[in-house]
């Protein structure tokens, strides 16, 4: 079974340009993006069997990724509204 992609460009294709620009120009966004990417990468490694932590740890990571995704989405929406 293929691993589902959760990178931000797949999650929010409508904000692709904003993601690219904010990663380079906004330190806060870049840090959130990096944290999200690191969390997503760790989840993928677990789901692929490269790492085998407890189910509780995996669930915590998934909640963390979801919270980061929500925060990034709000940030992108706010930035998009400011530039519209």
Image: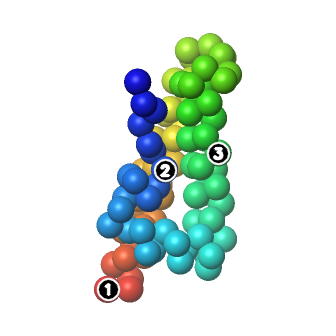
Neighbour tally class for label 2: few under 14, some 14-19, many 20 plus, Cα within 10 Å = some
Q: Please tell me which of labels 1 and 3 falls first in the chain.
A: 3
Q: Please tell me which of labels 3 and 2 falls first in the chain.
A: 2
> Helix, strand or loop at disc 3?
helix
Residue with the most extreme top position: 54
Q: CA distance from mark 1 to mark 3?
A: 31 Å
Q: Please tell me which of labels 1 and 2 falls first in the chain.
A: 2
Which of the 4 image quadrants contains residue 25? bottom right
Q: Which residue in the structure is indicated by mark 2?
A: 7
Q: CA distance from mark 1 to mark 2?
A: 25 Å
Question: Is residue 62 toward the left or the right of residue 84 in the image?
Answer: right
Work out whether 12 lies above or below 78. Answer: above
Q: Which residue in the structure is indicated by mark 3?
A: 38
Residue 57 visible from this viewpoint: no
Residue at image position (37%, 58%) is: 12
Q: Which residue in the structure is indicated by mark 1?
A: 84
The one nearer the camera, 63 or 24, is 24
Q: How far across and how far down the image is residue 31, in percent?
A: 65, 60
Q: How far across and how far down the image is residue 59, in percent?
A: 52, 24
Residue at image position (41%, 36%) is: 4
Question: Is residue 46 toward the left or the right of residue 18 in the image?
Answer: right
């Amino acid at each position: 079974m293929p691993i589902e992609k959760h990178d931000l460009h797949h999650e929010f294709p409508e904000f692709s340009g904003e993601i690219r620009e904010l990663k380079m120009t906004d330190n806060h966004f870049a840090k959130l993006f990096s944290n999200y990417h690191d969390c997503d990468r760790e989840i993928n490694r677990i789901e692929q069997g490269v790492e085998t932590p407890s189910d509780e740890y995996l669930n915590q990571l998934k909640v963390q990724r979801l919270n980061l995704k929500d925060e990034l989405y709000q940030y992108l929406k706010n930035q998009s509204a400011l530039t519209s």
